[in-house]
Image (cartoon, helix red, strand yellow):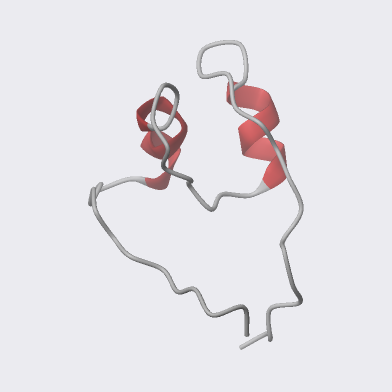
Amino acid sequence: MLGIGPRAEVPVDSSPLLPLLVPGTRRVAPIQARPARLLEPVAPARVGRRPADVPEG
């Protein structure tokens, strides 16, 4: 694909915690756009698009 792959550095038990761990770091958290926007007041994040098509399944 792009020559990059995922690397888990901070495991969490619940995906809603991810946006709280990302601000102020160089990390990214792949979560759905709607939850990211709902959490924006307490965990400001930049919502972006996927860099490439990801195969389903």
Using the image as rendered, state which of residue 4 and residue 13 is in the foreground.
4
* x then y, percent, for residue 36: 62, 34
* x then y, percent, for residue 23: 45, 24
Q: Residue at x 58, y 19 (%)?
A: 44
Q: Quadrant of residue 37?
A: top right
Vertical relation: 5 (above or below) 10 = below
Using the image as rendered, state which of residue 2 and residue 49 is in the foreground.
2
Q: Residue at x 24, y 53 (%)?
A: 9
Total of numbered circles in the picture? 0
* Quadrant of the frame with the C terminus: bottom right
Vertical relation: 30 (above or below) 25 = below
Left or right: residue 41 compared with residue 26: right
Left or right: residue 1 compared with residue 42: right
* x then y, percent, for residue 31: 56, 49
Residue reaching furthest to the top = 41
* Quadrant of the frame with the N terminus: bottom right
Vertical relation: 8 (above or below) 4 = above
Residue reaching furthest to the front = 3
Using the image as rendered, state which of residue 56 and residue 47 is in the foreground.
47
Q: Quadrant of residue 21?
A: top left
Q: Residue at x 41, y 68 (%)?
A: 6
Vertical relation: 40 (above or below) 16 = above
Q: Residue at x 66, y 31 (%)?
A: 46
